[in-house]
Each structure stands twice: as structure tokens, then as C-alpha cells.
């Protein structure tokens, strides 16, 4: 079962500090928590505290363009299983009841198709005011679960109902709401923004190398490996579909850039190594490229001529950097480092040896004995220290999607890397 996803909207009020404890409780139970802080909420708790505790990005401003590119507010409001507003101030409840959407929090609340639970906190008179009574009744009528606030002494010194329920009680209400939540009413003919595991790699940065490298001998000749780049490009496409920020470092191939992927074209292994290094840190690196092991020690500046004597020009080779092995040793080694190995025999034994030699976490070993490179399908074995996961022969796009699921599971327990 996947962990429940909570979108927690934190309103402004002295009780906002209790939201911190709520995040801690939810994370302790393994829930995925994404926090949205209203402008007023920011006066009481910091995005940094919430990011650290939720181990997730905190959203504060509707018009943050970068966020809209990464994940639009519509999607953010729908990828959760439950939207929780705590503390729900009188102002937030009023806006919710009126359908006002003038900032990130209220826009998400209006756009969501998920159940909403509000835990109010405000001064006793504000809670008892006819306007708030009306708003609460409207919200309940609309299907929002509005908890009863606790009764007691308030921060302002007055006494009565209006205190934010204790975090444990809110957690209890969350569990109840999750159990009882009706499925959202589908709008017909709409794009599907958020099926349950829509974008399991959202917030993750993934680097992929793909294709061959070309190592020039002279201006017209080169050393290369036989690689179509199809599997690497399919992996980049699947990673972007799964919500990751994808950096694809591609050798010379004639393939279109998959949607949403940032592509950097390179020619040689050394160029590829430099771009990979510049692309770190990432949450996962998948080295699919068939990098040429050697390059010409000297590249002739002019075309080497046949002189008719039958003499063969000497071709001295130099070893190329092993990109995968050096990333494994680098200070910025990604938490998940994956290599590929095309083998024709003893696939698993070779992959196990490569895993140790390269210092990566997984080797995706593909058996190229039956289907030469450039084909449309792949039969792979994921070899790790933990064992071997062998998959049936599948189209390359299906291999890519399955690999993304496995990567998402692996990364779920880790915090995203910080890039700035
Ligand atoms: O050593 P071999 O080429 O068989 O290893 C394959 C794996 O290592 C692939 O993941 C490939 O992308 C990576 N590799 C690399 N740099 C090299 C050679 C291979 O990153 N120079």
C-alpha cells in the first residue's frame, strides 16, 4: 500500500507552531506530507522548519513560476489523498466558504477534488461570531470536515472554544477522513491530473546518459559503439512522465527529445564526462550510454590520406574516462547510481562483477545475444547487492516505466538532493 499523501495548509495564527508537531506525527506514521504556508502563516513558522520536517518542498506563493513549471497548482491540489487546513483561521474558513482564491492556499482549496479537513483555531469571539458560524455551516454543507476547536484559555487571555485541537486529535481526524473519504466525482472528458501514483518522481532530479560517443580520429572518421540511444531516451521519457526533472546527456543519435526533458548533446566521452559532472548533484543517475572505452590518442586535424603504398596508418589509442566509475567515487555521488551492461553471455555473473568494479548500486544487465542493439525490446536483469530482479522481455518504453517505479520506491525513503 502506498503511504497516504497529505497536503497540509497552514494558516496564520499563534497555533501554527502546532502544525510543526502535526507534520512530525504524520511523518512518523510514514505519511507523505507536503506543506503550503499562507503569507500570514509565514509570520509564525518558517518554510525551512516545515521543509526539514516534511522532507519535502514547502509552497508559499501562487505566482512562483518555477513551481508552476515543476508542478502546477491544479496538480498539487489533487495529488494528495487529503487536504488538511491547520490551523484554519476565521479568514481562511471565510474564504473557503465564499470560494475565494486569491493566494496559493485558497487556490489549492478551490481547485482540489480531494476531501478537505479543517482544524480551526481562532479567538473565541471570532469562532462564535455569526459570520464564522455561517461559514462553518456552509463548509460542512459542502462536505468539508470542520473539526470542533478545543476549549480553554487562549493565547490572548480569553477563555472558550477556539483553540486548535491537539496534533494527536488532528491526526486521529485525518486517519478517519482517509478511511471514509469518498472517491472524487470524476469530471467527464477531462485530462487525468492525478491518479494515485501519478508523478512518483516529482521533486527528484535524474541524470541520464544515452547513446554512443564518437571519438574522432580525423575530421571524417571516428571510433564509436553500436548504440541506438533508444533505451536511454525511453528512460528519460519515463522519468519525465513520472514527474522528475530530467537531464539527458546524449551522444550523437537521431532521436527526438522526449517532452519535458532537458537535453545536452555531446560527441565524445570526455565531453559527456564533463556534462555529467556539471549536472550533479542528482537524486539518481542512470548511465545508459555506450561510452567508447578508447579514443584516438591524437586527432589528426586533416583527413588522413591513403597514400597508395598499402601502408596502414598507426592508430594509437588512449583510454577514456569511465564516467560511471568516477561518479561513484565523486563527493557528489548520487544516492542511487545505476549502470547498464550489455552482455551476450553469463549476463548475471558479468553484471555482478561490474557492480563491484564500478561501485554503483544497480546494474541493469541487458541480454543482447538474441536482440541486437537498436531493437525495440529488451530483456533486463536488475542486479544489486540485494539480489537479481529478472524481468520478461518487454518493449523498451515498458522497461523504462518499470525501472521508474523501482527507482521511485527506492528513493521514497530518501530526502531529495538540494541543488541550490
Ligand atoms: O565497462 P562497461 O562499458 O561495460 O560498463 C557499462 C556501464 O558503464 C554503462 O552504464 C556505461 O554507461 C558506463 N560507462 C561509463 N563510462 C565509460 C564506459 C562505460 O559511464 N567510459
Image: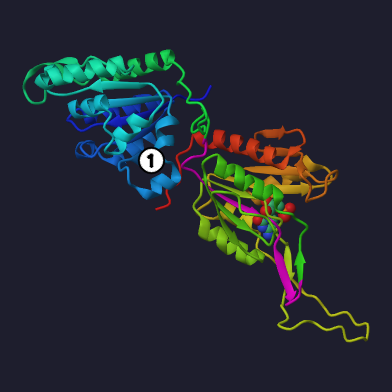
Indicate whether 150 appears above or below 222.
Answer: above
> Exactly how many numbered labels are in the figure?
1
Q: Is residue 215 located in the magenta-colored stretch of the structure?
A: yes
Determine the image quadrant of residue 161: top left
Query: With 64 as the anchor, is 328 left or right in this view?
Result: right
x and y, in percent, of residue 104 in the image: 31, 38
Q: Secondary structure at mark 1?
A: loop
**Residue 381 in view of the camera:** yes
| View extreme (front): residue | 189
Indicate whether 322 appears above or below 189.
Answer: below
Query: With 374 as the anchor, is 268 left or right in this view?
Result: left
Query: With 230 as the anchor, is 17 left or right in this view?
Result: left
Residue visible at 26% across and 21% down in the picture: 119
Q: Looking at the picture, tell me which residue is in the foreground, 199 or 138.
A: 138
Q: Is residue 158 located in the magenta-colored stretch of the structure?
A: no
Quarter of the image where ligand 1 sits? bottom right
x and y, in percent, of residue 255 in the image: 68, 55
Indicate whether 348 appears above or below 257.
Answer: above
Question: Badge 1 is on which residue?
Answer: 57
Q: Looking at the picture, tell me which residue is in the foreground, 63 or 42.
A: 63
Query: With 71 as the anchor, is 241 left or right in this view?
Result: right
**Magenta stretch in the rendered image:** 199-221
Q: Looking at the picture, tell me which residue is in the foreground, 91 or 34.
A: 91
Q: Residues within 10 Å of mark 1 (few under 14, many from 20)?
A: some
> CB at mark 1 closer than 8 A to ligand 1?
no
| View extreme (left): residue | 157
x and y, in percent, of residue 142 in the image: 32, 18
x and y, in percent, of residue 148 in the image: 23, 14
Amino acid at each position: 500500500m502506498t503511504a497516504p499523501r497529505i497536503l497540509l495548509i497552514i494558516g496564520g495564527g499563534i497555533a501554527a507552531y502546532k502544525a510543526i508537531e502535526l507534520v512530525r506525527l504524520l511523518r512518523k506514521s510514514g505519511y507523505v506530507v507536503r506543506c503550503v504556508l499562507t503569507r500570514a502563516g509565514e509570520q509564525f513558522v518558517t518554510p525551512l522548519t516545515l521543509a526539514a520536517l516534511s522532507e519535502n518542498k514547502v509552497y508559499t506563493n501562487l505566482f512562483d513560476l518555477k513551481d508552476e513549471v515543476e508542478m502546477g497548482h491544479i496538480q498539487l491540489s489533487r495529488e494528495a489523498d487529503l487536504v488538511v487546513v491547520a490551523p484554519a483561521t476565521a479568514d481562511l474558513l471565510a474564504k473557503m466558504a465564499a470560494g475565494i482564491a486569491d493566494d496559493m492556499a485558497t487556490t489549492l482549496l478551490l481547485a482540489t477534488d480531494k476531501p478537505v479537513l479543517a482544524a480551526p483555531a481562532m479567538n473565541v469571539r471570532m469562532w462564535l461570531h455569526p459570520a464564522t458560524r455561517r461559514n462553518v455551516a456552509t463548509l460542512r454543507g459542502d462536505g468539508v470536515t470542520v473539526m470542533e476547536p478545543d476549549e480553554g484559555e487562549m493565547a490572548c487571555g480569553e477563555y472558550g472554544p477556539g483553540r486548535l485541537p491537539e496534533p494527536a486529535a488532528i491526526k486521529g481526524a485525518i486517519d478517519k477522513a482517509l478511511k471514509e473519504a469518498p472517491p472524487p466525482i470524476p469530471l467527464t472528458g477531462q485530462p487525468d491530473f492525478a491518479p494515485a501514483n501519478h508523478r512518483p518522481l516529482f521533486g527528484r532530479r535524474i541524470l541520464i546518459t544515452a547513446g554512443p560517443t564518437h571519438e574522432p580520429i580525423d575530421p571524417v572518421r571516428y571510433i564509436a559503439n553500436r548504440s541506438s540511444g533508444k533505451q536511454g531516451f525511453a528512460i528519460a521519457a519515463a522519468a519525465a512522465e513520472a514527474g522528475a526533472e530530467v537531464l539527458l546527456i546524449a551522444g550523437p543519435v537521431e532521436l527526438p527529445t522526449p517532452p519535458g526533458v532537458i537535453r545536452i548533446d555531446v560527441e565524445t566521452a570526455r565531453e559527456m564526462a564533463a556534462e555529467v559532472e556539471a549536472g550533479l548533484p542528482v537524486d539518481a543517475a542512470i548511465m545508459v550510454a555506450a561510452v567508447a572505452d578508447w579514443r584516438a590518442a591524437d586527432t589528426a586535424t586533416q583527413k588522413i590520406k591513403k597514400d597508395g603504398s598499402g601502408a596502414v596508418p598507426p592508430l594509437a589509442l588512449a583510454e577514456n574516462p569511465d564516467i560511471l566509475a568516477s561518479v561513484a567515487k565523486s563527493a557528489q555521488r548520487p544516492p542511487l547510481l545505476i549502470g547498464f551492461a550489455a552482455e551476450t553471455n553469463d549476463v548475471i555473473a558479468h553484471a555482478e562483477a561490474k557492480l563491484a568494479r564500478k561501485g554503483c548500486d544497480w546494474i541493469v544487465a541487458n541480454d543482447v545475444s538474441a536482440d541486437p542493439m537498436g531493437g525495440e525490446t529488451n530483456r533486463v536483469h536488475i542486479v544489486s547487492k540485494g539480489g537479481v530482479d529478472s524481468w520478461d522481455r518487454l518493449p523498451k518504453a515498458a522497461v523504462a516505466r518499470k525501472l521508474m517505479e523501482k527507482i521511485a520506491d527506492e528513493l521514497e525513503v530518501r530526502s531529495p538532493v538540494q541543488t541550490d
